[in-house]
């Protein structure tokens, strides 16, 4: 049985800078490592606009095809951050374009990073009493209409199925943009008494949102995420749950991804459609734009009233449940790239790196090969037994220098080099990805298993800590405290985040967005003490807000 999607017509789905590179500029940069696959492929003619900058780029490409087969080029971050980001994704083999504009194929190395995120969060979700399950991705359109602010917020992004099995459907179906509606439909059938509460579930799923400006991992038509949904007997329990889950995300960001997010509450304007409160973790990327890396929503009784999700309390009265929902997605992978990467490529925190240690054996003469490979294999087994993720690159089609560059570009935290002299001395050479050149290289580390294991684990811990501290320093040096709108505008014009007291209206907030391109990212949980005066109105303010341009 075949079903068809009738979706909005697309013109320019990708942002201008993304579109310009979507064909030849990307191919030019990504034909880097023959005979390996060439990173991002060009979009098919069927999915590209008929006449645009792509045709101009295609003329340029004919002049660089020969060069493209030998050069390994990553655009410097300072020159063009967006081009650098796309180059890294392609060269590190994280993702490629899908045949439908705005979609992506997550390649094994990129998916392994997502799996590391899943592995950590799955444990935390279960420790906090949640169970995994799965809901259908097709949702009756009438469900979306039941919660007024929800349908208003999501309507422009909906993908609709109108034909199934060759016939017009009686009711159009929404391809899941989020699951609050269908979850409530099922909760209504499962919840009857206070004994059924709390009900706390999570699902790992794909989501479709018809975005008009896309960027791999950060914003695509379809993406992967987890979404948690809970129902409670009291508003206090729901609030506690919403705060607990944003704390789980915050700890993941700091402890695993080495991203120093700022946790806080969204403004009313930026609150999730259908929620009473939205809590968020905001991360500063390498170009100083903000990335909303995770959210947790206190839904109050908005959805339970719309769907009639009720329970009988201990006194025999019928009550609507109080709910939460919370999610992180594959945009976290984009956040890791943009937080830690450099001109060489990826730089991965060891705790989420698919490969923590790469071993490169080095030999020149045939009679040296066996001894070097035996030693390298022994070292690999020692580290694997210690629970580390190890790659032994024993291929002989590439030079050691090529391998060094390749694995540095892939962001592997540690490299171990083993040559004939190292075999003779029973030692290895170890290089850190986060410290380039000779400064990051240490000679003469013993191959003795207990010594090597301890040394490698210590260095991985140091790298994890170093990346976090580096990101904290970058973040803090780019946040400016402001006390007036003029100061805010100046900070934003310099590409920085502005932090200042705020008690102005929604209209004032929208004015700032219109005039500067910045939005309130959050009211941080950590607030300064003392009296405050709103930077916009001069009236008393209870909180400071953080303003920034964002993805």
Image (cartoon, rainbow, N blue to C red):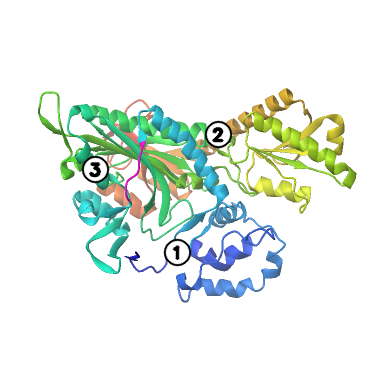
Tell which circle, 2 or 3, labels the residue nearer the N-terminal end.
3
Q: CA distance from mark 2 to mark 1?
A: 35 Å
What is the number of callouts on the image?
3
Whole-percent x and y of residue 283? 46, 41
Residue 388 tag number? none
> Callout 1: few (<14), some (14-19), or many (20+) C-alpha neighbours within 10 Å?
many
Q: Which residue is mark 1?
A: 101
The reply to whether dot 2 and dot 3 touch (C-beta < 8 Å) is no
148 left or right, relative to 521: left
Instruction: Report the front residue among 412 and 109.
Output: 109
- Is label 1 in a helix, a strand or a loop? loop
Answer few, some or many: residues within 10 Å of disc 3's Cα (few below 14, many 20 plus, some between 14 and 19).
Answer: few
Prevailing secondary structure class for the magenta stretch in the rendered image: loop
What's the magenta region?
132-136
The residue located at (17%, 30%) in the rendering is 193
Residue occupying the point 35% across, 40% down: 133
Residue 309, horizontal then vertical, whole percent: 18, 39
Residue 380 in which image quadrant:
top right
Q: In percent of the image, x 66 and y 33: which residue is there? A: 384
Looking at the image, is mark 1 or mark 3 earlier in the sequence?
1
Q: Of the residues under marks 2 and 1, which one precedes in the sequence?
A: 1
Q: Where is 117 relative to 176, above or below?
A: above
Quarter occupied by the N terminus: bottom left
Above or below, 550 against 462 in this view is below
| Residue 491 shows up from this direction | no
> Which residue lies under the disc numbered 2?
468
Q: CA gap, disc 2 to disc 3?
A: 41 Å
SS for callout 2: helix
Q: Give residue 303's quadrant in the image.
A: top left
Q: Which residue is mark 3?
A: 186
- Left or right of 77: which side holds 133? left
User: Are the residues tagged 1 and 3 within 8 Å (C-beta)?
Assistant: no
């Amino acid at each position: 049985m075949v079903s068809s999607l009738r979706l909005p017509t697309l013109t320019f789905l990708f942002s201008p800078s993304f579109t310009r590179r979507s064909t030849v500029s990307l191919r030019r940069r990504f034909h880097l490592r023959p005979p390996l696959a060439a990173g991002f492929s060009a979009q098919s003619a069927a999915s590209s606009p008929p006449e645009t900058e792509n045709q101009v780029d295609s003329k340029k490409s004919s002049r660089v095809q020969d060069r493209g087969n030998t050069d390994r080029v990553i655009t410097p971050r300072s020159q063009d951050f967006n081009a650098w980001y796309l180059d890294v994704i392609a060269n590190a083999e994280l993702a490629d374009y899908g045949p439908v504009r705005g979609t992506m194929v997550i390649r094994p190395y990129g998916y392994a990073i997502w799996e590391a995120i899943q592995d950590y969060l799955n444990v935390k979700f279960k420790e906090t009493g949640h169970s995994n399950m799965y809901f259908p991705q097709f949702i009756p359109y009438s469900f979306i209409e039941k919660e007024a602010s929800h349908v208003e917020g999501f309507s422009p992004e909906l993908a609709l199925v109108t034909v199934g099995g060759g016939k017009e459907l009686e009711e159009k179906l929404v391809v899941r943009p989020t699951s609050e509606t269908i979850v409530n439909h099922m909760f209504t059938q499962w919840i009857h008494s206070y004994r059924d509460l709390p009900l706390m579930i999570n699902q790992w799923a794909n989501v479709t949102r018809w975005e008009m400006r896309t960027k791999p991992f950060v914003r695509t038509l379809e993406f992967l995420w987890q979404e948690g949904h809970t129902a409670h007997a009291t508003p206090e329990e729901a609030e506690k749950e919403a705060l607990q889950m944003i704390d789980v995300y915050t700890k993941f960001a700091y402890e695993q991804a080495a991203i120093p997010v700022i946790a806080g509450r969204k403004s009313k304007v930026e609150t999730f459609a259908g929620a009473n409160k939205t809590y968020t973790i905001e991360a500063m990327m390498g170009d100083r734009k903000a990335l909303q890396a995770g959210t947790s929503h206190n839904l109050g009784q908005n959805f339970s009233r719309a769907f009639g999700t009720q329970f009988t309390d201990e006194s025999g009265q019928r009550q609507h449940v109080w709910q939460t929902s919370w999610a992180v997605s594959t945009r976290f992978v984009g956040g890791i790239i943009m937080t830690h990467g450099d001109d060489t490529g990826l730089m991965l925190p060891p705790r989420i790196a698919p490969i923590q240690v790469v071993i490169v054996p080095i030999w020149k003469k045939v009679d040296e090969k066996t001894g070097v490979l035996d030693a390298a294999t022994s070292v690999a087994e020692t580290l694997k037994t210690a629970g580390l993720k190890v790659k032994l690159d024993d291929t002989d089609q590439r030079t050691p220098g090529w391998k060094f560059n390749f694995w540095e570009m892939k962001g592997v935290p540690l490299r171990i080099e083993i040559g004939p002299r190292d075999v003779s001395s029973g030692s290895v050479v170890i290089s850190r990805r986060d410290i380039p050149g000779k400064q990051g290289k240490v000679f003469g580390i013993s191959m003795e298993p207990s010594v090597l294991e301890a040394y490698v684990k210590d260095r991985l811990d140091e790298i994890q800590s170093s990346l976090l501290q580096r990101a904290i320093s970058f973040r803090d040096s780019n946040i400016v405290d402001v006390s007036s709108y003029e100061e805010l505008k100046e900070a934003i014009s310099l590409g920085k985040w502005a932090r200042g007291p705020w008690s102005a209206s929604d209209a004032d907030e929208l004015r700032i967005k219109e005039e500067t391109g910045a939005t309130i990212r959050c009211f941080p949980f950590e607030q300064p003490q003392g009296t405050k005066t709103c930077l916009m109105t001069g009236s008393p303010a209870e909180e400071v807000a953080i303003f920034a341009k964002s993805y």
